[in-house]
Every structure is written in C-alpha cells, then in structure tokens.
Image (cartoon, rainbow, N blue to C red):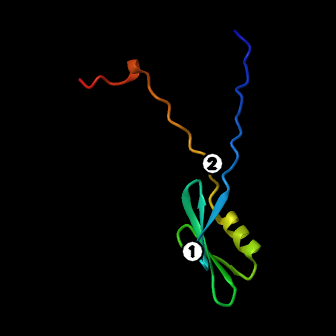
Amino acid sequence: MPPSVPTPVLAVPPLRVQWRQADDDLWVATLGGEFAGTLATDATGLHHVTDRIARPVLTTSSWAQATAALDAAAPVASRRRRRRRRSAAARPTGR
C-alpha cells in the first residue's frame, strides 16, 4: 500500500468590502460583486449604516466606525469555486 500523501490546502483570502460613492451623501458597499449595504450621511454629519437587506446596523459620527460596522456585519464570503466540466464520455447522449 503506498504511503498517504497529504493533499495541499489552498488558502483563499476572504473578499473585502468595496465602497463606491453613489451620491454626495450615500455610499454603497459590495462584497464579491454582491450588494452588502449602504452608508448614508445626514445633514447633522451622522453616518447611518444598513446591511444587505436594509436592516439598520449603526448610527455614528465616525466614518471609520461606520465602515468597520458594515465590514463586521457583512457575511463572510470567498471566491466561488468553478464547476468541473464533465468529460465527453460522461455527458448524457440525449437519447
């Protein structure tokens, strides 16, 4: 019996929340290309953070706290795995 060889594990780094400015007082967050939430600033300077399903996460006067709150609330995501293609011999013939 051949000795067992450990299978290498490839570490995939987690995706980071990306911020895009949608308006003067509105920023939109995405994670892995999917909507992750918003950060809106009101006239008093408070930042209101909502998650990907519009639930309030935090209201704060600090931009850093606001973005960190959404980073923490965003679901952990990693890159999608590609599906393996079946060989021609394994494909159904359609009969």
On the image, the x and y values in percent for residue 50 come to 60, 74
- Specify few, some or many for label 1: CA neighbours under 10 Å numbering under 14, 14-19, or 20 or more: few
Sequence-wise first label, 1 or 2 = 1
Q: Distance between the residues labelled 1 and 2?
A: 23 Å
Give above or below for 50 relative to 82: below
Mark 2 lies on a secondary structure that is loop
Select label 1 or label 2 by which is in front: 2
Q: Write the residue at 68% across / 42% down.
A: 12
Mark 1 lies on a secondary structure that is loop
Furthest toward the left, the residue is 95
Q: Write the residue at 66% across / 52% down.
A: 15
On the image, the x and y values in percent for residue 11 come to 71, 39
On the image, the x and y values in percent for residue 81 come to 56, 40
Left or right? Give the position of 11 relative to 88.
right
Q: Are marks 1 and 2 in contact (CB under 8 Å)?
A: no
- The C terminus sits in image quarter: top left
Left or right? Give the position of 14 relative to 79.
right
- Specify few, some or many for label 2: CA neighbours under 10 Å numbering under 14, 14-19, or 20 or more: few
Q: In which quarter of the image is residue 21?
A: bottom right
Q: Write the residue at 76% across / 72% down.
A: 64
The disc label shown at residue 78, or none: 2
Q: Write the residue at 65% across / 60% down.
A: 17
The disc label shown at residue 55, or none: 1
> Residue 88 or 23: which is nearer the viewer?
23
